[in-house]
Image (cartoon, coloured by chain):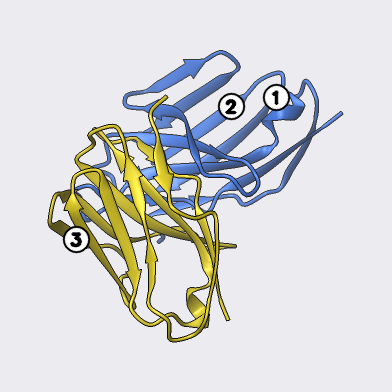
Amino acid sequence: DVKVTQSSRYLVKRTGEKVFLECVQDMDHENMFWYRQDPGLGLRLIYFSYDVKMKEKGDIPEGYSVSREKKERFSLILESASTNQTSMYLCASSFPDSLKFGQGTRLTVV
Amino acid sequence: RKEVEQDPGPFNVPEGATVAFNCTYSNSASQSFFWYRQDCRKEPKLLMSVYSSGNEDGRFTAQLNRASQYISLLIRDSKLSDSATYLCVVPSRGGGFKTIFGAGTRLFVKA
């Protein structure tokens, strides 16, 4: 079965910490995405990448950066974690247009 | 107008009932649409794709109304296991690879 795997299911980090969320897909997909999901707001796109070393801002990129050094891996970086970044983070990949999601990382910033 | 809007529900229906959800979108140029299902504390999973007028898969039917700019999801003979949140997904007005998720419609099927 094809998979999108996120490195952690649950994370607790302190305010100001630099946080790395890792995502790996085994489907050789070109496109990868990072979303966050909050109650009442649905899924919101943070960043996406359509090729190695290529990235595009989504709707809410502030406070985040990404890295895609290899096709299968897309990392989300919280430069200095804040409490308003407490959320469920979902990684996805796609080819051509339907999305396959990872299991999600529930991040709590205290 | 939001790019995609869904009735948040919740819809509470008995087993065996037929239930329908609507999703309205603002990008008249959209060509492909999707319904995802999300169980509590799990990731969204693709339920159906809609590329033309509609799609049917067993008890599930998705229909597209381009004139009124909405897609619908019809579930016949509801099962307890259909209880979930159903997310409507449409291409972003900005184009490219971006898609917009609706906030979801919650469905509870009761015995």
Q: The yellow chain is which one?
A: A
Image position of A19 with respect to B53: above or below: below
A17 or B60: nearer the eye? A17
Secondary structure beneath label 1: loop
Q: Are marks 3 and 2 on the same chain?
A: no
Image quadrant assignment for residue B83: top right
Foreground: disc 3 or disc 1: 3
A19 or A98: nearer the eye? A19
Chain on which label 1 sits: B
3D distance between C-alphas at marks 3 and 1: 41 Å
Q: Which mark is residue B18?
A: 1
Image quadrant assignment for residue B54: top left
How crowded pointer 3 is (Cα within 10 Å; few <14, some 14-19, many 20+) is rated as: some
Q: What residue type is labelled 2?
A: Leu
Quadrant where the image shows the N terminus of chain B:
bottom left
Q: Residue A56 carries which label?
A: 3
Residue wearing tag 2: B74
Q: What residue type is labelled 1?
A: Thr
Q: The blue chain is which one?
A: B
Relative to residue B67, is residue B38 drawn left or right? right
